[in-house]
């Protein structure tokens, strides 16, 4: 419930900010003249988009959640860094490929499980400039992650939890608001 409320509030703020930015922009300005650094709301959570040059960009993202039940709490926090290399730029459509490294930490008060989840991803995507300051992007992603952790064992001593490795493919979309 709290997560849905926060998502709706964040999404509403993005649309208000996008409307304010579009009111200030010149409709004939190319994307490169409008600005570079931007906020994104996408696949791995909210983040910061920083163009290094016209062909290279870096994205930082953060994520987090807390789930509560009767007598327990579960939580996850994560951070990620993506490097993007743009391949083509036709009108307002750009294609890119890149890589992402991420790290998540999960915890639970129900059985005192603490897990660290490092991950790596390769991605291919397209970005479309709806307006000079507002973009929509979509990505196809191949990921690898490994789960390492500890849990509370017999006699309340800490023991290593079984580790696991996961290969996955996926896709997603996101919004990009440039300053």
Image: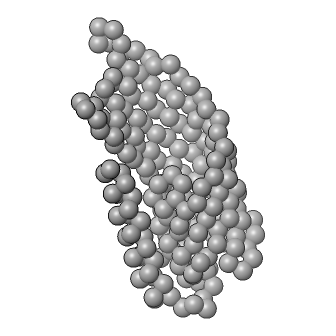
Coloring scheme used? one colour
Q: Residue at x 45, y 25 (%)?
A: 149
Res 13 → quadrant: bottom left
Residue 142 in the image, given as x and y percentages of width and height? 67, 44
Q: Is residue 108 above or below residue 131?
A: above
State the residue at coordinates (50%, 88%).
Answer: 25
Count of numbered labels shown in the rendering = 0
Q: Is residue 85 among what the camera can see? A: no
Q: Residue at x 61, y 91 (%)?
A: 28
Q: Is residue 16 among the parts visible in the rendering?
A: yes
Farthest residue in the left direction?
71
Name the foreground residue: 151 vs 2.
Answer: 2
Q: Is residue 27 above or below residue 136?
A: below
Q: Nearer the viewer, residue 153 or 71?
A: 71
Locate residue 24, reporting x and y percent: 46, 88
Residue lying farthest top?
Answer: 155
At x 58%, y 60%, the residue is: 173
Residue 92 in picture, x, y percent from top left:
68, 78
Where does residue 144 sit, x and y in percent of width and height?
63, 37
């Amino acid at each position: 419930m709290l997560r849905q409320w926060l998502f709706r509030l964040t999404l509403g703020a993005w649309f208000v900010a996008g409307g304010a930015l579009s009111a200030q922009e010149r409709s004939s300005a190319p994307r490169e003249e409008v600005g570079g650094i931007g906020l994104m709301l996408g696949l791995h959570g909210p983040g910061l988009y920083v163009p290094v040059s016209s062909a290279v960009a870096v994205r930082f993202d953060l994520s987090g959640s807390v789930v509560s039940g009767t007598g327990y709490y579960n939580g996850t926090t994560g951070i990620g860094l993506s490097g993007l290399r743009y391949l083509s730029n036709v009108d307002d459509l750009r294609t890119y490929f890149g890589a992402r490294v991420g790290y998540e930490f999960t915890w639970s008060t129900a059985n005192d499980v603490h897990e660290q989840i490092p991950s790596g991803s390769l991605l291919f995507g397209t970005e479309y400039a709806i307006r000079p300051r507002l973009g929509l992007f979509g990505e196809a992603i191949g990921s690898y992650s490994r789960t390492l952790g500890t849990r509370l064992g017999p006699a309340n001593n800490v023991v290593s939890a079984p580790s696991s490795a996961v290969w996955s493919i996926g896709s997603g979309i996101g919004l990009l608001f440039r300053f």
